[in-house]
Amino acid sequence: MESSRALISPDIDAAGLFECAERQFGDMFEIQRLVAASPTRALLVVRDAVLKRQVVLRVHMQPDTPSRRWFLRETELLASLDHEGLRTIYSAGLEKVSKGLSAGAPARSQMF
């Protein structure tokens, strides 16, 4: 696991979060690195197993909270925009996931 410690909250178990993401999303994505994490969100660089390209996966980790509703609204809004300065959202989904992650997981185009 490779990570940028400056963007990961000190109260986050980065290795545990990375392993959990691998368990939950491993059939869809090859988890490459954790870019940023807070108690509510994680941002990971992943490789799409089907499309064979690098994408960014945003995961929200607190279901049934105001921040989840905000996260979903932000995803819908970003998906509705078409501007060269914004990354395209290719996919979004909601699912309950195990041990610490509950995800609304929009995959964004190559940010890095």
Image (cartoon, rainbow, N blue to C red):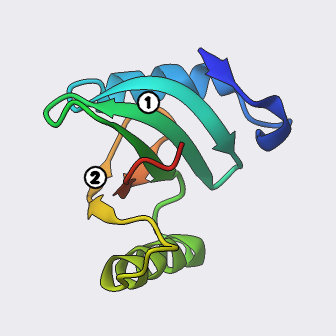
Residue 91 lies, in percent from the top left, at 25, 59
Quadrant location of the N terminus in the rendered image: top right
Question: Relative to 13, is 89 above or below?
Answer: below
Q: Is residue 30 left or right of residue 37?
A: left
Quarter-wise, where is residue 40 in the image? bottom right
Label 1, label 2: how far apart the Cα atoms are = 13 Å
**Alpha-carbon neighbours of circle 1 within 10 Å: few (<14), some, or many (≥20)?**
many
Vertical placement of 95 versus 24: above or below?
A: below
Residue drawn at 76 percent across, 39 percent down: 8
> Which residue is at a point 33% across and 30% down the rendered structure image?
47
Give the image location of residue 62, x and y in percent: 54, 57
60 over 85 or under it: above or below? above
**Residue closest to the eye, 27 or 103:** 27
Residue type of the residue flagged with mark 2: Glu
* Residue reaching furthest to the top: 1
Q: Residue 21: which disc?
A: 1
Q: Residue at x 44, y 65 (%)?
A: 87
Image-quadrant location for residue 76: bottom left
What type is the residue that disc 1 sits on?
Answer: Ala
Residue found at the far front of this picture = 84
Left or right, residue 8 beside residue 2: right
Q: Element type at marker 1?
A: helix
Give left or right: position of 68 versus 95: right
The crowd level at tag 2 (other Cα within 10 Å; few <14, some 14-19, many 20+) is few
Determine whether 32 is above or below 70 in the image. Answer: above
Q: Do callouts 1 and 2 mark residues in contact (Cβ within 8 Å)?
A: no
Which residue is rendered at x = 59% and y = 31% of the image? Answer: 34
* Horizontal relation, residue 93 to residue 16: left or right: left
In this figure, which residue is indicated by the disc labeled 2? 95
Which quadrant is the C terminus positioned in? top right
- Marks 1 and 2: which is nearer the front? 1
